[in-house]
Image: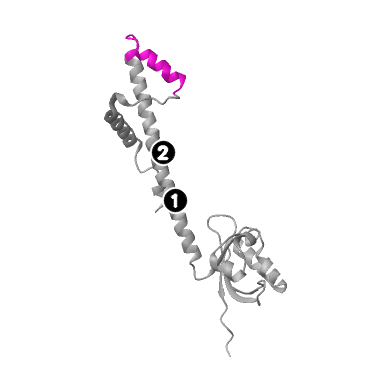
């Protein structure tokens, strides 16, 4: 689904024609809600007078058409919302099914999002990870070069992959090869890693 499909699929003129068709189908049986405003009640009173009936009924019909137009627009919005939610769910499933661990970091290097594999590698929950700096998991000796590496990515400068040792609670350090790119959607970077290949014997 493209972003274009999030807009109303029916032109405004089509909505108006559909609204009129619905009103004609209901005929004079289309009633006003019980909590109708004072203005509507005045219109009904005017419609009862021969001198003002024509104009009042024409205006009332116009209001009814507008009300049905709003209902149709609401249906379109609900459909667009359902499509958007389904798209977000699919993207999250793809994110979690990725073959590499992935983090979204803000411009200070703190975690905004993480996929399922990243949580597994870090042996932590998303609640624990979100808001923490990436350097929380990096060996102290590697913090400075990791920060420099992230700063280059934030400046949208090419940054080579980086070998890191992640400090994981209750586990030995995890050797990974990480790559980073500037986030195209917001301030910050996208970071991904895979396990480093074992040293050749």
**What's the magenta region?**
36-53
Who's the residue at 36% across and 21% down the image?
60
Is 164 above or below relative to 66?
below
Query: Is residue 177 found left or right of 53 in the rendered image?
Result: right
Whether residue 52 is in magenta: the answer is yes
Q: Dot 1: what SS?
A: helix
Mark toward the start of the polypeptide (1 vs 2): 2
Evaluate if marks 1 and 2 touch, with contact meaning CB atoms under 8 Å apart.
no
Q: How many marks?
A: 2
Quarter of the image for residue 183 reads bottom right
Q: Residue at x 61, y 63 (%)?
A: 125
| Image position of 30 with respect to 87: above or below | above
Crowding near the residue tagged with mark 1, few <14, some 14–19, many ≥20 C-alpha atoms within 10 Å:
some
- Residue corresponding to mark 1: 84
In this view of the protein, can residue 122 be seen by the observer?
yes
Percent position of residue 137, x then y: 66, 69
Location of residue 133 with respect to 166 vertically, above or below: above
Secondary structure of the residue carrying tag 2 is helix
Count residues near mark 2 (Cα–Cα under 10 Å), then give few for <14, some for 14-19, many for 20+. few
Image quadrant in which the N terminus is located: bottom left
Looking at the picture, the colour scheme in use is one colour
Residue 24: image location, x then y, percent: 27, 28
* Residue sitting at x 40%, y 34%: 70
Q: Residue furthest bottom?
A: 201
Taking the image as shown, residue 162 lies to the left or right of residue 11, namely: right
Cα distance in 3D space between marks 1 and 2? 15 Å
Q: Is residue 101 magenta?
A: no
Q: Position of residue 42 (x, y in %)?
A: 42, 15
Q: Which residue is mark 2?
A: 74
């Amino acid at each position: 689904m493209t972003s274009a499909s999030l807009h109303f699929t029916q032109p405004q003129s089509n909505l108006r024609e559909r609204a009129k068709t619905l009103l004609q189908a209901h005929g004079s049986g289309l009633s006003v809600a019980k909590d109708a405003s004072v203005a509507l009640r005045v219109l009904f009173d005017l419609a009862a007078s021969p001198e003002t009936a024509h104009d009042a009924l024409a205006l009332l019909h116009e209001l009814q058409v507008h009300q049905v137009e709003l209902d149709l627009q609401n249906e379109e919005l609900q459909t667009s919302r359902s499509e958007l939610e389904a798209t977000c769910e699919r993207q999250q499933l793809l994110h979690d099914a990725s073959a590499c661990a992935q983090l979204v970091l803000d411009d200070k290097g703190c975690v905004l999002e993480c996929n399922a594999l990243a949580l597994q590698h870090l042996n932590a929950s998303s609640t624990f990870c979100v808001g923490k700096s990436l350097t929380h998991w990096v060996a102290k000796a590697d913090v400075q070069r990791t920060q420099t590496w992230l700063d280059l990515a934030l400046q949208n400068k090419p940054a080579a992959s980086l070998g890191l040792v992640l400090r994981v609670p209750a586990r030995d350090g995890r050797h990974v090869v990480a790559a980073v790119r500037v986030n195209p959607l917001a301030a910050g970077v996208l970071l991904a890693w895979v396990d480093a290949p074992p040293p050749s014997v």
